[in-house]
Image: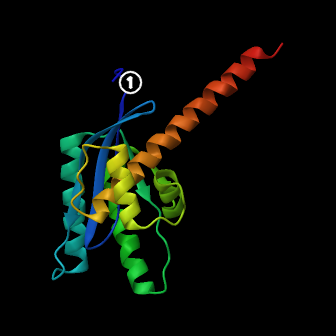
């Protein structure tokens, strides 16, 4: 690594299980750091489950010290109650890094799939296989952890493109008479 590596946490929010994955990104080079899931107790009240997610994510953030966060956007499904609960878990997943001052990027599920698999409709197995290909040391314990690593990879690629676009814009300005 050149010393300019940026540590990124990807978060795949869910009320039962929130996946997280941390990578270091140094230009086009990606290095696996860690991944896992924060699990809430199905028998607990909604408030307690949200606190469990917050505490678990807060512990991961404190231990691994990412500098940026990326989270999957909520998709709306037919079950309004499930969508609302997912939105509440997503709020917790955004709050934990926001309280530490981390910038938070959001990516649509299809954008994550397109970045990692090459198509916007890849399935969980394809995502897991491509994450393993891109990060050979990664061994996600769940589909949620694999998805979280895919979200972090998407952010790494997105920030690389933004950096390239900024350099091109500066070069164009300098080239003006």
Confirm whether residue 11 shows in the render: no
Q: Where is residue 130 in the image (x, y as percent from the top left)?
A: 39, 52
Above or below, 12 relative to 81 = above
Q: As drawn, is 155 to the left or to the right of 148?
A: right
Camera-side residue of 58 and 72: 72
Q: What is the count of numbered marks?
A: 1
**SS of the residue at dot 1?**
loop
Camera-side residue of 123 and 46: 123
- Residue drawn at (21%, 60%) of the image: 141
Above or below, 19 relative to 80 = above
Q: Name the residue under label 1.
A: 4
- Residue drawn at (63%, 32%) of the image: 165
- Quadrant of the rendered image containing residue 3: top left
Above or below, 143 relative to 136 = below
Among all residues in the image, which is located at the extreme top? 177
Q: Name the quarter where the N terminus is drawn.
A: top left
Q: As drawn, is 135 to the left or to the right of 75?
A: left
- Quadrant of the rendered image containing residue 100: top left
Confirm whether residue 81 shows in the render: yes
Q: Where is residue 28 in the image (x, y as percent from the top left)?
A: 45, 33
Q: Position of residue 171 (x, y in %)?
A: 69, 20
Camera-side residue of 128 and 154: 128
Above or below, 125 relative to 135 = below
Label 1 CA crowd tier, 10 Å (few <14, some 14–19, many 20+): few
Q: Position of residue 109 (x, y in %)?
A: 48, 63
Q: As drawn, is 173 to the left or to the right of 130?
A: right
- Residue drawn at (51%, 35%) of the image: 160
Camera-side residue of 76 and 21: 21
């Amino acid at each position: 690594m050149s010393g300019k590596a940026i540590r990124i946490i990807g978060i795949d929010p869910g009320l039962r299980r929130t996946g997280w994955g941390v990578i270091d990104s140094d230009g086009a080079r990606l290095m696996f750091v860690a991944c896992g899931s924060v699990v809430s107790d199905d028998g607990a009240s909604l408030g307690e489950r949200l606190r469990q997610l917050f505490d678990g994510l807060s512990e991961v953030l404190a231990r691994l010290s990412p500098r940026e966060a990326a989270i999957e956007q909520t998709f709306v499904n037919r079950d309004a109650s499930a969508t609302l609960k997912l939105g509440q878990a997503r709020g917790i997943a955004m709050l934990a890094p926001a309280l530490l001052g981390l910038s938070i990027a959001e990516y649509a599920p299809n954008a994550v799939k397109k970045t990692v698999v090459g198509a916007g409709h890849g399935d969980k197995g394809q995502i897991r296989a491509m994450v393993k290909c891109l990060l050979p040391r990664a061994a996600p314990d769940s589909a949620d952890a694999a998805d979280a690593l895919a979200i972090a990879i998407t952010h790494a690629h997105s920030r690389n493109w933004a950096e390239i676009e900024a350099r091109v814009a500066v070069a164009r300005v300098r080239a003006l008479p």
